Image (cartoon, rainbow, N blue to C red):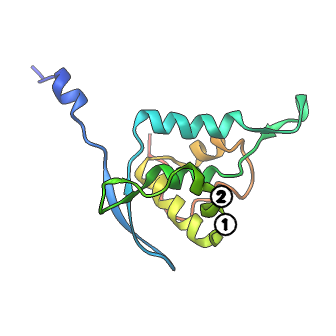
Amino acid sequence: MADFVDKTAFFGVPLAEVDVEVVRLGMVHLRELNGTLRDEWENYTVQRRVGQGKDSKPDTRGVKALAIQLSVIDTRTGTFMFDRKDIARIQAMPGDILDGLFGHIKQLNKLYEEDVKAAEGNSDGEGNDTTGSASPQG
């Protein structure tokens, strides 16, 4: 008979953390999003809209910056490196740095291309996977 997980083990699963090399930036420490933070990111991507009525579409501005804000950890303190007031500054960074870092975040959180496109409203160009990761085989 198989051993089943108990409540202590179920709630004791740690969040994954990785150190990644980001081109033009250097080493960055990332922490996996917990359920609350992932919901926050997903809600941000679907609730913000541009236009009105039937012509409205998701507003994807800031999607990558929010993921970065919720994932980058200061290794000295073990806390978030950035807070909400830093999102505009994150957005102002070079696009290749944001794309590279977001690629690592997608990989860490197992956000596959179809997840990102769904969150971004199937917009072209915003969800390009530059990490070389692929969707899971099912």
Q: Name the one closer to the observer, 35 or 114.
A: 35
Residue 54 seen? yes
Q: Which quadrant of the figure has residue 88? A: bottom right
Labelled disc at residue 135: none
Disc 1 marks a residue whose amino acid type is Ala
**Residue 82 to residue 92: above or below:** above
Q: Secondary structure at mark 2?
A: helix
Can you give x and y, in whole percent of width and height, for residue 52 in the image? 89, 33
Q: Which quadrant of the figure has residue 17? A: bottom left
Can you give x and y, in whole percent of width and height, for residue 118 in the image? 65, 40
Quarter in which the N terminus is drawn = top left
Disc 2 marks a residue whose amino acid type is Ala
Q: Name the one closer to the observer, 72 or 56.
A: 72
**Residue 106 to residue 96: above or below:** above
Q: Name the one closer to the observer, 83 or 29.
A: 83
Classify 10 Å Cα crowding around label 2: few (below 14), some (14-19), many (20 and above). Answer: few
- Left or right: 30 as drawn, with respect to 124: left
* Outermost residue toward the bottom in this view: 24
Number of callouts in the render?
2
Can you give x and y, in whole percent of width and height, for residue 49 in the image? 78, 37
* Pointers 1 and 2 in contact (C-beta within 8 Å): yes
Classify 10 Å Cα crowding around label 1: few (below 14), some (14-19), many (20 and above). Answer: few
Residue 134 seen? no
Residue visible at 57% across and 57% down? Answer: 86
- Which residue is identified by label 2? 88
Residue visible at 44% across and 54% down? Answer: 107
Label 1 to label 2: alpha-carbon separation = 6 Å
- Which residue is identified by label 1? 92
Q: Which quadrant of the figure has residue 59? A: top right
